[in-house]
Image: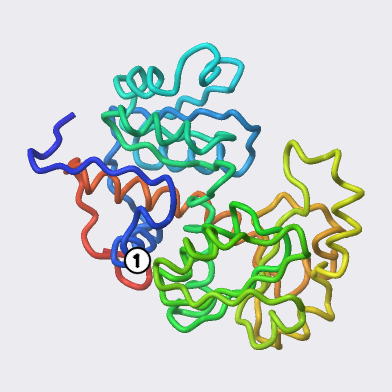
Amino acid sequence: MGESPTATLRHVLEVDDLESGELARILDLSELLDPPQVLAGHGGVLLFEKPSARTRTSMEMAIDQLGGHPVSLSSAEVGIDTRESAEDLGRLLSGYGSVIGARVFEHHKLERMAAVATVPVVNLLSDDAHPVQTLADLLTLRQCFGHLEGLTVTYVGDANNVARSLGIGCGLVGAAFRISSPPGYRFDDVSVDRIGSVGTEVSVLDDPSEAVAGADAVYTDAWYSMGQEEEQRIRRDAFAPWRVDDALMDAAGPDAVFLHCLPAHRGDEATDSVLDGPRSRIWPQAHNRMHSARGLLLWLAEQRGLPGDAGPADADGTT
């Protein structure tokens, strides 16, 4: 594959697999208007235990934009640990593509795959983490404010994989992270410590209005995810005070932006007036899933010494 003899194999299973400078480099590469074709003649294999819209589309488009050919496989076609073990799939797919992306339930499947793979493994979502979403979130915030250091990001709602990765990402770029969740749906001490381990200034607050006060961004996610539909009624009752409506956005201040990783259950975690309002950045955020995926793939190619060095990116995305 033309790799440099000093090539480094890197996997991205959580945001803190990256250092601060590496994360900044990925964001710079994400804004290149004419990216080098580092995957020309190569493929990328994408595994999906969970259905996907943004993740599959953005990754397939990113691979294509870098000259590669994406191959997406569903759980029925692969069956991680049912038809074949995660380890055997890592060995197998390393011979077919230059990168393996996997969207799984249990995080350990990614870890086991990465332990034996000879190409980079990227976490496209697990029950523990969603690093590719955080890359898009940070890219969106940088485009909104022109910088990331010193921002305050408040997450309102379920303390889930999206929130965990976002908190870690905030620490790596010098942003403060606040979170407010209902009782029973909050981070445990282990998760808070993990977020803080990269230097994140973490604040866990009971009152969502207090949590958003003075924040630059208010972020929420669905109250129930795939596999939790039977909990809808219980969760709706528990989370109702954490709904992001105009009053909560007003408590954050006039310059705060609203983010949501989508899909949204309109009227539950956020009202239509917020989702579609002037402070919402949900569609640029969703589109940045593709751009940040492209930046991540470019960075992984740099680590492996693949041809097509993009060079330093200027603020406007040119080289």
Residue ID at (51%, 19%):
81
Q: Quadrant of residue 31?
A: bottom left
Q: Is residue 130 left or right of residue 227?
A: left
Q: Looking at the picture, how far across and down is residue 88, in whole percent?
A: 38, 17
Q: For mark 1, does the 10 Å Cα neighbourhood hold few (<14), some (14 to 19), or many (20 or more) residues?
A: some
Above or below residue 310? Residue 148 is: below
Instruction: State the colouring used for the structure image.
Output: rainbow
Q: Is residue 215 left or right of residue 316?
A: right
User: Disc 1 designates what residue?
Assistant: 24
Q: Secondary structure at mark 1?
A: helix
Closer to the camera in the image, 142 or 149? 149
Image quarter in which the C terminus is found: bottom left
Closer to the camera in the image, 284 or 20? 20
Q: Looking at the picture, how far across and down is residue 76, in whole percent?
A: 61, 16
Residue ID at (54%, 65%):
192
Q: Quadrant of residue 306?
A: top left
Q: Looking at the picture, how far across and down is residue 46, in whole percent?
A: 47, 30
Above or below residue 36? Residue 239 is: below
Image quarter in which the N terminus is found: top left
Residue ID at (67%, 60%):
260
Q: Looking at the picture, how far across and down is residue 125, in whole percent?
A: 54, 42
Q: How many marks?
A: 1
Q: Residue furthest front?
A: 189
Above or below residue 215? Residue 162 is: above
